[in-house]
């Protein structure tokens, strides 16, 4: 099992480039199933979740020709309608293959998706299942497998009882080649949804309203495939900005879109983090005498739940108390590990913690429970006095490309020990 060893309190400086958005790449790869033609995907991040998505594509009968930051995928016709549990158990986004398979073949079988287990149990997929049923699919559950079947999916009107990014994207893709018109209400509005819709429309789909709460899809018989360039990863952008602020380092973040992290940058203005920004870069200048600032996570364009863990680390260095209110996922806190490192954090309930600062953090042996907590442990380790050891770093590799090498280029003292175990 591989791990990271971090010698804390090294100053960071220089430039770091943002990779392609994980959450955009993991949706465009299964979208390839919707067409029999070849799709070319550019600016592809080299991370474990992408490796698993390509592996699943090939397992379904597709071909994938991959080079540095690019992959060409062709699925003339899927060879089977069953998603392998050996692959699906490794990443949450395996659920995104279900809708396109169902739409293309009229049938799909799959296990509960894996990935990060956030909260007390596996993350539910009810919104997906209810949406597929609303479009005319029959559902059977047997031997821990879901089986969906529909001779031809039909357009419907569907209201998301909970705003869901993956739910919105999944049903939007599924409806593209369904019969009739589908109206999706209370949709998520993330940038990744809009760019996916733009691509599908260029290939012949008829989607209106992506990026708003209501999306209307007029089904077509078939679509073609073309070229798609993945947008910069806004979560990675925000993570690096918080990392620079937490370590009081001057850092320039390039190949990003500052508009996608406006909620974070507006908070920076309130807590004393000085920065500059341009069309595709953000430079963190200094973050001395940080002020506390309470946050409440919210769907885009609000404060992202995926930045909640890094922000919690940042608030351990602020002068005063702040409340971190997680509204998206229950128990999405790793504060027990921060407390082990010396943080003064009080858990009020599964959704709220109070962080009192500033506190000195000390290196400890930790185990990464999930992707975002894992990168936050790295930030805590960079702040801490002494050595921090982080185990189960496969979770971090799922979403951050060569993170140890990239941080070493900034001056961080971080080493990878052992080899990756899949």
Image (cartoon, helix red, strand yellow):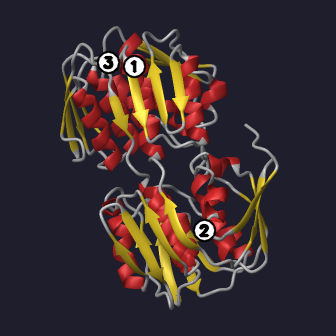
> Front-most of 284 and 27?
284
- Disc 3: CA contacts within 10 A as few (<14), some (14-19) or many (>=20): some
Gap between marks 2 and 3 measured at Cα:
53 Å
Give the number of the disc on residue 410.
Answer: 2
- Disc 2: CA contacts within 10 A as few (<14), some (14-19) or many (>=20): some
Residue 188 position in % (x across, y down): 31, 47
Gap between marks 3 and 1 measured at Cα:
29 Å
Task: List the residue tagged with mark 1.
Answer: 38
Q: Nearer the viewer, mark 2 or mark 1?
A: 2
In contact (CB < 8 Å): disc 2 and disc 3? no
* Res 129 quadrant in image: top left
**Which residue occupies 30% across, 41% down?**
195
Q: Is residue 394 above or below residue 27?
A: below
Q: Quadrant of the C terminus?
A: top right
Residue 215 in view in this figure: yes
Residue 190 position in % (x across, y down): 33, 50
Disc 2 is placed on an element classified as loop
Gap between marks 2 and 1 measured at Cα:
38 Å
Mark before the other along the chain sequence, 2 or 3? 3
Q: Is residue 322 above or below residue 94?
A: below
Mark before the other along the chain sequence, 3 or 1? 1
**Which residue occupies 48% across, 40% down?**
44
Task: List the residue tagged with mark 3.
Answer: 136
**Which residue occupies 38% across, 64% down?**
281
> Front-most of 400 and 294?
400
Q: With 175 as the anchor, is 108 left or right in this view?
A: right
Disc 1 is placed on an element classified as strand
Q: Nearer the viewer, mark 2 or mark 3?
A: 2
Q: With 87 as the anchor, is 237 left or right in this view?
A: left
Residue 186 position in % (x across, y down): 26, 45
Residue 334 in view in this figure: no
């Amino acid at each position: 099992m591989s791990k990271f060893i971090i010698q804390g309190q090294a100053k960071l400086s220089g430039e770091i480039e943002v990779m392609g958005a994980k959450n955009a790449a993991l949706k465009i790869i299964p979208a390839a199933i919707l067409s029999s033609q070849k799709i070319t995907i550019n600016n592809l991040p080299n991370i474990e979740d992408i490796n698993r998505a390509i592996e699943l594509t090939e397992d379904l009968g597709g071909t994938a020709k991959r080079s540095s930051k690019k992959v060409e995928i062709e699925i003339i016709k899927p060879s089977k309608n069953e998603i392998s549990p050996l692959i699906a158990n490794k990443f949450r986004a395996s659920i995104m293959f279900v809708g396109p398979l169902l739409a293309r073949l009229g049938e799909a079988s799959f296990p509960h998706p894996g990935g990060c287990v956030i909260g007390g149990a596996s993350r539910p997929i009810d919104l997906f299942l209810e949406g597929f049923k609303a479009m005319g699919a029959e559902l059977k559950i047997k031997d821990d497998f879901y089986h969906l079947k529909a001779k031809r999916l039909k357009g419907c009107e569907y209201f998301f009882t909970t705003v869901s990014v993956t739910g919105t994207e999944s049903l939007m893709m599924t409806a593209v080649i369904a019969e009739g018109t589908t109206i999706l209400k209370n949709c998520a509005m993330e940038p990744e949804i809009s760019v996916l819709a733009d691509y599908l429309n260029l290939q012949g789909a008829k989607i209106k309203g992506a990026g708003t709460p209501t999306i209307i899809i007029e089904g077509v018989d078939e679509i073609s495939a073309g070229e798609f360039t993945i947008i910069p990863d806004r979560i990675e952008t925000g993570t690096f900005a918080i990392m620079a602020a937490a370590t009081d380092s001057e850092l320039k973040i390039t190949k990003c879109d500052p508009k996608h992290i406006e909620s974070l940058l507006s908070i920076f203005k309130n807590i004393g983090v000085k920065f500059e920004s341009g069309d595709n870069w953000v430079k963190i200048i200094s973050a001395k005498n940080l002020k506390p600032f309470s946050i409440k996570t919210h769907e885009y364009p609000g404060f992202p739940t995926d930045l909640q863990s890094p922000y919690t680390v940042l608030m351990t260095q602020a002068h005063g108390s702040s409340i971190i209110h997680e509204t998206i996922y229950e128990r999405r806190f790793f504060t027990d590990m921060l407390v082990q490192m010396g943080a003064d954090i009080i858990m009020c309930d599964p959704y709220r913690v109070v962080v009192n600062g500033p506190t000195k953090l000390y290196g400890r042996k930790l185990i990464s429970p999930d992707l975002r907590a894992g990168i936050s442990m790295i930030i805590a380790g960079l702040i801490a006095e002494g050595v921090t050891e982080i185990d189960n770093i496969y979770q971090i590799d799922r979403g951050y490309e060569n993170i140890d090498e990239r941080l070493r280029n900034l001056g961080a003292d971080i080493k990878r020990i052992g080899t990756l175990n899949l």
